[in-house]
């Protein structure tokens, strides 16, 4: 699956140009339907081929567009009129009409679910259904459980697009709510006659056990929607079978259709039928407890578990484990986390971190001068390093979770390429709203860009949960998938899991310690590679964190334990002051503002103001210099060249600017690395002294005030710093820059390492205290996590 980057870009550009041409051509009469026999044969062949690819483990790379026009229907089916293929307009949403059609071949997946359907006149066409929950990269046999041959569909206000030959066309459906499954007794079928005989459907299970086997088979294979659909159909034959209802509830829980899962569990708990065993009620209570847990209703979950344990004493141990998890989550809602365990779990591929959310002293306020009209302010004074928020991703995707086919997309809003993870997150968001309509206001309450009205000034909106039983194929909302695309574009984060903190100076070149506090979606143009998977950073949509506004010189930083975001204050914040964080990073205001264009905002923070004082020409030169930073890491690069490079970068700053110069901080640390390498190669301690000096200067460039720059002799000459109280830096953090979260603790530990090499244990200990302070500001999480992340130095150097 190795495809050159340029080839991918060309394919995406061709796709976008084709869509633009279609829009320019405008509506026209639909081309005549394809030959019925030929299209059905082709569809059957594609179905067989897709099944073969899955069975042999063969996967494809697809290209697609994001952020393009995706209309959806808001008109109830009862208010629409029927139409046939031959009367449809091409390149036009046929407003006021619906298409009645019948599935004639088994479906298969190729960027979307593809069905071959016929209308009552016997004309056939293909339909591509994008974004349908539970179908993404699903094997064809499971898709057939959702869209079985012979099922009748009504497509609300369908869009017909001619194929490249312009002699045929197919239907495109972008919103899953435009698909209506028509029951045989529906009144819209009254008087409808089909010209062709009904296609032969798959055999319906003849017995209770066969339904059981089919539904469980889908569930165990991870095809949860197919499982829920199968149990729903089984309940039509066996309406009093509680097992089917429980199993459907389990499938709903796996899909995170939580209100539907709770409805199934509650129905079984309340069943008054004779012969309902305590074990069945206990199982239903356990399911209800799991759902309440997923809903963050931990006290209610404990009550359910206790009742379940009373009915099934033999399962008390399992229920006790879950009760313990509930109590852990309740503790976490107060900000008390086992950070060390979270960190260890986050290092596991494919892991998701099970913790509760914490919302600190904050509230959302209307801010008309801000994009979106809102911001988050502190409700009390906050110290540097204080925990502000712990938030679970509404939807998230990581490269190590992906399987099967890959999708690379062109974002029509930003012009940038997006990887499979971005496409996965969009799919998850649509699926979650489809299954839990009560969550729609939370997502649609986020900023969707300048082409949409501003969202409400308050957040979150009230959420009303409907516990009525639901059919998994019935959608209660009209889903605007285009708006979801826009919301993702303007709010998505690229999470970086907090990693191992300390890297030895000898090996530090090119390594970052903490997760990068950048909301900027990964830019494909920044890399030079040929494998599409390289262009696939993790992606996530968070709700409350999306309301934090931008400042390049933000007062808040964030990092991830995979899908969990942790936000901390890095500066003292007054009551009523706004929390801000940088959405992007760059060497100067020029690159930062270029990247901020995607958010349609500008920045006037202290960093940007200082860069403007430096002048546009100086900023442009600084950008060019930093783009060649990797050249300093060559073993052939001399110290003189690195010092000259630093002088050039320093020269791009106004002489009156002050010590905070993040671009210089990076170069000074590169210089420190080079000095330390020479010190170890030559055993010349003077190089190590220069390495320490460069590290201290780097810290100052990130806003750290270094109180003691001495490198030999007795300590304690600064204030009362002596013995165990010696601290070589100031705890004043008002000038800290968020970019320092990447480097400051690592730089400080490099100083510790250098002093240990020099045998100066008192200074090493003092700088170790400084490191803990810096770590507590940027990362926090206590000594246990600090020791875990910096194990090499805490075990061997101090």
Image (cartoon, rainbow, N blue to C red):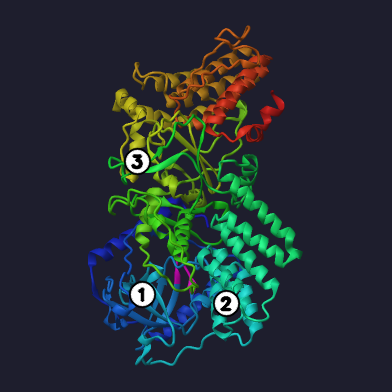
Is residue 566 found left or right of 155 in the rendered image?
A: right
Q: Which residue is mark 2?
A: 231
Q: Residue 121 magenta-drawn?
A: no
Where disc 3 sits, the SS reads helix
Tell me residue 560's x, y (percent).
Answer: 53, 43
User: Which is more toward the observer, 442 or 479?
Assistant: 442
Instruction: Give the residues in magenta.
Output: 108-113
Compare residues 660 and 399 and report the one nearer the observer: 660
Between marks 3 and 1, how big is the CA–CA gap?
38 Å
Secondary structure of residue under mark 1: strand
Left or right of 215 on screen, residue 174: left
Q: Quadrant of the C terminus?
A: top right
Q: Nearer the viewer, residue 226 or 263?
A: 263
Q: Position of residue 508 (x, y in %)?
A: 58, 30
Q: Which image quadrant is residue 32 in?
A: bottom left
Number of residues whose C-alpha sits closer than 10 Å to that of mark 1, classed few (under 14), some (14–19) or many (20 or more): many
Residue 606 location in percent, x, y? 35, 27
Residue 619 image-quadrant placement: top left
Q: Are marks 2 and 3 in contact (CB under 8 Å)?
A: no
Q: Earlier in the sequence, mark 1 or mark 2?
A: 1
- Of the two numbered discs 2 and 3 in the rendering, the one whose residue sits closer to the viewer: 2
- Residue at image mark 1: 170
- Furthest residue in direction right, as rendered: 314
What whole-number distance in Å separates the C-alpha atoms at marks 2 and 3?
Answer: 49 Å
The residue that disc 3 covers is 596
- Quarter of the image for residue 34 reads bottom left
Q: Residue at x 50, y 73 (%)?
A: 469
CB contact under 8 Å: marks 3 and 1:
no
């Amino acid at each position: 699956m190795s495809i050159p980057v340029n080839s991918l870009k060309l394919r995406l550009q061709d796709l976008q140009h084709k869509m633009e041409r279609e829009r320019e051509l405008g509506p026209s009469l639909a081309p005549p339907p394809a030959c019925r026999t030929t299209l059905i044969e082709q569809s059957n062949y594609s179905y067989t081929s897709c099944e073969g690819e899955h069975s042999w483990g063969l996967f494809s790379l697809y290209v697609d567009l994001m952020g393009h026009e995706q209309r959806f229907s808001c008109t109830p089916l009862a208010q629409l009129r029927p139409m046939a293929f031959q009367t449809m307009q091409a390149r036009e949403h046929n407003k006021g009409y619906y298409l009645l059609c019948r599935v004639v071949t088994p479906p298969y997946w190729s960027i979307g679910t593809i069905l071959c359907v016929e209308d009552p006149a016997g004309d056939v066409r293909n339909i591509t259904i994008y974004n349908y929950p539970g179908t993404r990269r699903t094997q064809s046999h499971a898709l057939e459980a959702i869209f079985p041959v012979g099922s009748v569909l009504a497509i609300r206000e369908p869009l017909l697009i001619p194929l490249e030959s312009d002699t045929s066309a197919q239907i495109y459906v972008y919103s899953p709510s435009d698909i209506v499954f028509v029951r045989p007794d529906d009144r819209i079928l009254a008087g409808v006659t089909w010209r062709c005989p009904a296609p032969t459907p798959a055999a319906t299970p003849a017995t209770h056990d066969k339904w059981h086997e089919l539904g469980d088979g889908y569930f165990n294979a991870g095809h949860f929607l197919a499982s829920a659909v199968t149990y729903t159909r089984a309940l039509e034959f066996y309406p009093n079978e509680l097992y089917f209802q429980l199993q459907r509830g389990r499938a709903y829980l796996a899909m995170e259709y939580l209100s539907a899962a709770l409805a199934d569990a509650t129905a079984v708990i309340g069943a008054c039928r004779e012969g309902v065993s305590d074990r069945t009620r206990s199982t239903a209570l356990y399911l209800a407890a799991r759902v309440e847990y997923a809903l963050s209703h931990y006290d209610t979950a404990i009550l359910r578990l206790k009742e379940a344990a009373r009915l099934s004493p033999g399962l008390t141990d399992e229920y006790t484990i879950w009760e313990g998890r509930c109590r852990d989550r309740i503790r976490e809602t107060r900000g008390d986390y086992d950070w060390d365990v979270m960190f260890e779990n986050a290092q596991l591929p494919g892991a998701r971190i099970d913790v509760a959310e914490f919302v600190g002293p904050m509230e959302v306020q209307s801010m008309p001068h801000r994009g979106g009209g809102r911001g988050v302010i502190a409700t009390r004074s906050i110290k540097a390093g204080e925990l502000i928020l712990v938030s679970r991703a509404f939807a998230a995707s990581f490269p190590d979770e992906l399987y099967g086919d890959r999708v690379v997309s062109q974002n029509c809003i930003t012009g940038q390429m997006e990887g499979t993870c971005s496409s996965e997150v969009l799919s998850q968001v649509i699926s979650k709203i489809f299954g839990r309509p009560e969550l729609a206001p939370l997502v649609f309450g986020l900023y969707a860009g300048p082409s949409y009205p501003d969202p409400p000034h308050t957040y979150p909106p009230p959420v009303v949960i409907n516990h009525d039983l639901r059919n998994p194929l019935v959608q209660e909302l009209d889903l605007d998938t285009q708006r979801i695309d826009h919301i993702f574009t303007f709010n998505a984060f690229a999470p970086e899991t907090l990693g191992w903190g300390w890297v030895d100076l000898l090996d530090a070149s090119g390594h970052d310690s903490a997760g990068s506090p950048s909301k900027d979606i990964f830019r494909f143009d920044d890399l030079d590679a040929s494998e599409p998977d390289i262009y696939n950073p993790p992606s996530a949509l968070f709700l409350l964190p999306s309301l934090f506004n931008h400042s390049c010189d933000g007062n808040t930083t964030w990092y991830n334990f995979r899908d969990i975001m942790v936000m901390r204050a890095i500066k003292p914040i007054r009551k009523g002051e706004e929390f801000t964080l940088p959405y992007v990073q760059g060497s100067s205001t020029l690159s930062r503002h270029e990247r901020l264009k995607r958010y349609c905002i500008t920045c006037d923070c202290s960093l940007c103001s200082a860069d403007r004082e430096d002048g546009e020409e100086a900023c442009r030169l600084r950008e060019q210099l930093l783009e060649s930073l990797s050249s300093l890491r060559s073993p052939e690069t001399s110290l003189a060249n690195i010092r000259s490079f630093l002088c050039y970068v320093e020269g791009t700053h106004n002489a009156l600017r002050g010590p905070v110069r993040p671009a210089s901080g990076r170069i000074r640390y590169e210089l420190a690395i080079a000095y330390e390498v020479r010190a170890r190669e030559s055993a010349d301690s003077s190089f190590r002294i220069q390495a320490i000096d460069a590290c201290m200067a780097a810290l100052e460039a990130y806003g750290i005030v270094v109180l003691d720059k001495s490198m030999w002799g007795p300590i304690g000459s600064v204030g009362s710093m002596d013995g165990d109280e010696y601290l070589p830096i100031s705890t004043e953090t008002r000038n800290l820059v968020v970019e320092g979260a990447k480097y400051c603790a690592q730089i400080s530990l490099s100083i510790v390492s250098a002093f240990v090499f020099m045998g100066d244990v008192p200074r090493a200990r003092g700088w170790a205290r400084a490191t803990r302070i810096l770590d507590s500001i940027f990362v926090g999480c206590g000594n246990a996590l600090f020791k875990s992340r910096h194990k090499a130095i805490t075990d061997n150097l101090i």
